[in-house]
Amino acid sequence: MKVVIKVGSQTIISPEGEVLEDVMADVIRQVVELQQQGHQVILVSSGAVALGRVISKKIVGKTYGSSVADKQLLASLGQPRLMAIYAKICEEKQLMVAQLLLTKYDFQTKRSYTNILRLLQKGLDQPNVLVIINENDSVAVDELMFTDNDELSGIIAAQIGADKLLLLTSISGVYDKNPENPDAKLIPVIGVKDKLPEVSGAKTALGRGGMASKLNTARKMGNVGVMTHIASIAEENVIVRLVNGDVAIGSRVIPEHKKSGRKKFLAFGQTGAVATIMVNDGLVKVLASGQQCISILPVGVVKFTGEFAKGDLIDIVTEKNQKIATGVARYNAAKLKEYLGGKNHPPLVHYDYLHVNYEVFAE
């Protein structure tokens, strides 16, 4: 089984700024146990910015703010220390750590997407290697930042075709109301389309995410056929138990549709395309009808913005500039300019590499 595990800043660093190395060690212990059982595991770990704050306050007594520049510096301070702690713990268990830092830009072109996937597949095939991923906060700017590492972990899970995604937090799962309310009840099973009471989007003091973000990621994963568990990292042996089928922990979002390969990644990710393709109302109606095997042909393209190469991600929008789909270009922008609006030309996006967001049409 392929598994992606995400741990948040608040799970490995206390509100007082203490690095919870015992928690990190327990995560690694469980990862090793899963690998010994034959599972393939990738770890997505937050904590660089929070750890940078700990370091700067401890060494020079300085507290930084929350500007992009401050967070970039803090991430640069904290990421080496974060990985050093993980590496030390892993080496004691004869496990090597492979670090991967990513931004949305890294998923926009075929070359970078393929390079990332090649590394992940190679790492998964090595029982003595653990790939640990974090957002590259040191270089990310607002438009290239993930919403949080919940989103990043979902994109990775979709990319490798994971069987399960575990979102581990300091809360036991999704509740029907604020979990601080004594009447709050845990929701153990959630369907992709279930209507739930409003989930608080409140974020932790250390991280960017919140329960609303986790539920959003989990539902996206459900739409592409991946089971997601949201649970507390404090539960004993939580990772091993969830992977091995224990359903009595936290909340699980039941998957609905099965997709595979690149199309699964497209369905989840929406990681930022390099160009926008505007299509006419006739093509929009065909796409909205739910017909299968519909490709994007140049005859249906009104105009486009941005330069793109074969294999790059492109967004499909209506004439009202509403995004309705994402796909992979079969040829470059120069060729589309030549074909634009004409008949009897090859499809710009083949249906096997097109994800249509039907939820837009239901609104």
Image (cartoon, rainbow, N blue to C red):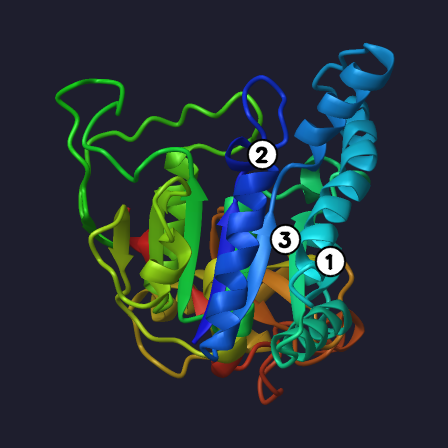
- Helix or strand or loop: what does disc 3 sit on? loop
Which residue is tagged 1? 100
Label whose residue precedes the other's in the sequence (2 or 3): 2
User: In the picture shown, does residue 101 fall above or below 179?
Assistant: below
Farthest residue in the left direction? Answer: 183
From the top left corner, tell me how far across and down residue 45 is, in percent: 60, 47
Q: Nearer the viewer, residue 358 or 22?
A: 22
- Helix or strand or loop: what does disc 1 sit on? strand
Badge 3 amino acid: Gly
Task: Using the rendered view, name the quadrant where residue 191 is placed.
Answer: bottom left
From the top left corner, tell me how far across and down residue 44 is, in percent: 58, 52
From the top left corner, tell me how far across and down residue 293 is, in percent: 40, 83
Badge 1 amino acid: Leu
Q: Where's the N terminus, which quadrant?
A: bottom left
Task: Give the label, 2 or 3, closer to the camera.
Answer: 2
Q: Please give the name of the residue rendered at 54% of the width and 75% of the height, measured from the top-left corner.
A: 262
Q: Disc 1 and disc 3: Cα gap in Å?
A: 19 Å
- Helix or strand or loop: what does disc 2 sit on? loop
From the top left corner, tell me how far across and down residue 359 is, in percent: 32, 54
Which residue is tagged 2? 20
Q: Please give the name of the residue rendered at 76% of the width and 78% of the height, measured from the top-left corner.
A: 335
Q: Please give the name of the residue rendered at 16% of the width and 18% of the height, measured from the top-left corner.
A: 182
User: In the picture shown, does residue 179 fall above or below 246?
Assistant: above
The tag on residue 272 is 3
Task: Give the label, 1 or 3, closer to the camera.
Answer: 1
**Relative side of 218 to 71, left or right:** left
Contact flag, marks 2 and 1 (Cβ < 8 Å): no
**Relative side of 56 to 47, left or right:** right
